[in-house]
Amino acid sequence: MPLIVITLLLAVVVTGPIEGCSSASIPQDPVTSESDSVMVVPAFPELSFRRPVDLTSAPGQAGYLYVVQQAGQINVFENRKDVARSTRVLDIDNRVNDSGNEEGLLGLAFHPNFQKNGYLYVNYTADNPRRTVVSRFSADPSNPTAPIDPGTEYQIIEIAQPYGNHNGGQVRFGPDGYLYIGMGDGGAGGDPQENGQNPATLLGAMLRIDVDRTSGNQHYAIPPDNPFVGRSDARAEIYAYGLRNPWRFSFDAPTGRLWAGDVGQNQYEEIDIIEKGGNYGWNTMEGLHCYDPKSGCNQDGLILPVVEYGRGYGASVTGGFVYRGSDVPALSGRYVYGDYVSGRIWALTDKGDGSFDTEQLFDLDISISSFGIDASDELYFLSFDGNIYRFASSSM
């Protein structure tokens, strides 16, 4: 597959999805893209959040958006520009360990049948022992602002974490109705436990489980077509592996593609299209390049990224979405992603022949922590300056 490679300009070392320098806010005026076709504008100027890391809507609640704050809170608010307040609906900060820069409440997903069962799922890190927890809570689907009782927590799966970074943390339901869980390699630097290339561990992998059934003493079941079902040397929960730290992934419904941003080690950030049973190379490779060993690595069977970029452009990729909204025609069908450290935002265009064109849209002085969409598929991004921004057409 032809690949887009952005030239390495300088070296900076980072080891996580939300590391690096803090950034100042962009002005409260629209910022136009470098192609003059797209703008970034503050979406909800009266609202501010502390370290927001996820944004989503719930089925049947088109007029509301939910924001996850890393310390352990979920807030909801009306999806209108002049909204003046948000409501805290869940606070589990007493269960969440956010002592590390990359730890905390990291992901939220609503069950596809939320309007009937009221189920939502979260991913957070806990301590004593250090671990990732994926849990279900029960909400009132008829009342978006109703408090969610922390006592309704039903833990689905716990995964031991050897270090405090590279937790992945996102949860999303796929078009198949299964829950996908992004897991980093366990942390430290360079994958010292070699989890990325070890399908016998749940670390360094994209997991896929059935939360509508249980099996044995597990609070979930294994989808029968998961790629490692029946193998004694691999975990059946794994959908794909060889990932370092998949910080934000998303499904594109029209194509069925699963897109992920995988944070690099010392030199390269990458965007991957995740395929069932795929091995994405870490820590044999970082991006398109050998990592261990530094040259002559065996690339047989590895799936390479569709795009990489070096430290001249950023140091911690934040995965995004393929734009399927209607407000910004210039972005239609393009995958939009960013970098937490540099504040750059790009758009990838599928050329239809297996290759992609990339365009830098913005170079902003903000820390881009996550992207999200609303019920109309309009695209937003979150920043650690506390704001939520949205994309708009410059012809508006």
Image: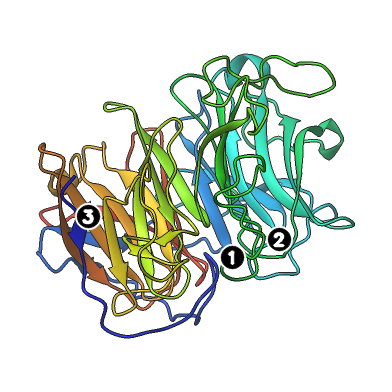
Q: Nearer the viewer, residue 78 or 163?
A: 163
For label 2, the SS is loop
Q: Is residue 182 above or below residue 207?
A: below
Compare residues 252 and 36 and report the one nearer the observer. 252
User: What type is the residue that disc 1 sits on?
Assistant: Arg
Q: Are marks 1 and 2 in contact (CB under 8 Å)?
A: yes
At label 2, the amino acid type is Ala
What colour scheme governs how the chains and residues are painted in the rendered image of this protein?
rainbow
Residue under the point 52% across and 69% down? 384
Q: Position of residue 271 (x, y in %)?
A: 34, 53
Question: Above or below — where is 334 with respect to 193?
Answer: above
Q: Which residue is mark 1?
A: 51
* CB atoms of marks 2 and 3 within 8 Å: no
Q: How far is disc 1 from disc 2 in space, using C-alphas? A: 8 Å
User: Residue 71 shows which numbered tag?
Assistant: 2
Residue 168's x, y, as percent?
58, 52
SS for callout 1: loop
The residue identified by callout 3 is 347
Q: Earlier in the sequence, mark 1 or mark 2?
A: 1
In the image, 381: left or right of 198? left
Residue drawn at point x = 71 percent, y = 49 percent: 124
Tell me where residue 135 sits by quadrant: top right
**The residue positioned farthest toward the right in the image shown:** 128
Q: Secondary structure at mark 3?
A: strand
Asked if residue 171 lies left or right of residue 357, the reply is: right
> Residue at position x 32%, y 50% from top?
304
Circle nearer the N terminus (2, 3): 2
Q: Position of residue 146 (x, y in %)?
A: 70, 35
Could you tell me which residue is drawn at 90 percent across and 57 percent down? 128
Q: Amino acid at mark 3?
A: Ala
Looking at marks 3 and 1 on the same chain, the residue that comes earlier in the sequence is marked by 1
Asked if residue 122 shows in the view, the reply is yes
